[in-house]
Amino acid sequence: MSKLYQYKKISFNLINRNLFIMLIAVTLVYFALQIGITSAVGTKGEALDQIRQEKDQLRRENEITSAKIDKYKAISAAQEYAKKLDLQNKKVNFLQQPDSNSVALAQ
């Protein structure tokens, strides 16, 4: 029995040693993957921040341009432009649509 006991003891020691080595290897691979993923995501985050800043800047420029367009579309601006070109007001008669209440229905 002592030979069997020694054989089991040696095999358990060998198994424990192999398991410990695999545990260390898996842990090292895990940390290597974490570092790789973190560095990859970190660089993408900077690019996303830059794109967001450009988007905000374009939005502000768009608002400024819209304000300028609205300024030129205002009635007062049109009237000033008409005065510069010496345009005159004309009276226009628009045809009105007939009211359905005043139309006689043929029966």
Image: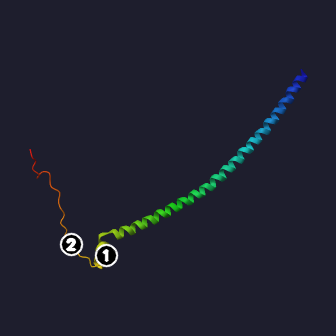
At 46% across and 66% down in the image, what residue appears? 61
The color scheme shown is rainbow
Q: Secondary structure at mark 1?
A: helix
Residue lying at the far right in this picture: please name it: 3
At 36% across and 67% down in the image, what residue appears? 70
- x and y percentages locating residue 94 in the rendered image: 19, 63
Which residue, given by chain and number where applicable, does mark 1 sit on?
Answer: 81
Which quadrant of the figure contains the C terminus? Answer: top left
- Mark 1 or mark 2, earlier in chain: 1
Name above or below for residue 64 compared with residue 88.
above
- x and y percentages locating residue 26 in the rendered image: 74, 41
For residue 90, which numbered disc appears in the image?
2
Number of numbered discs present?
A: 2
* Mark 1 vs mark 2: in front: 2
Q: Secondary structure at mark 2?
A: loop
For label 2, the crowd category at 10 Å Cα-Cα, with few meaning under 14, some 14 to 19 and many 20 or more, is few
* In the displayed structure image, the side of residue 71 where residue 96 appears, left or right: left
> As shown in the figure, which amino acid type bears the numbered disc 2?
Lys
* In the displayed structure image, the side of residue 2 where residue 93 appears, left or right: left
Q: CA distance from mark 1 to mark 2?
A: 16 Å
- x and y percentages locating residue 58 in the rendered image: 48, 63
> As shown in the figure, which amino acid type bears the numbered disc 1?
Tyr
At 87% across and 24% down in the image, what residue appears? 5
- x and y percentages locating residue 40 in the rendered image: 65, 52
Name above or below for residue 7 compared with residue 96.
above
Which quadrant of the figure contains the N terminus? Answer: top right
Frontmost residue, 65 versus 28 = 65
Frontmost residue, 49 versus 107 = 107
For residue 62, which numbered disc appears in the image?
none
Name above or below for residue 81 compared with residue 58.
below
At 19% across and 68% down in the image, what residue appears? 92
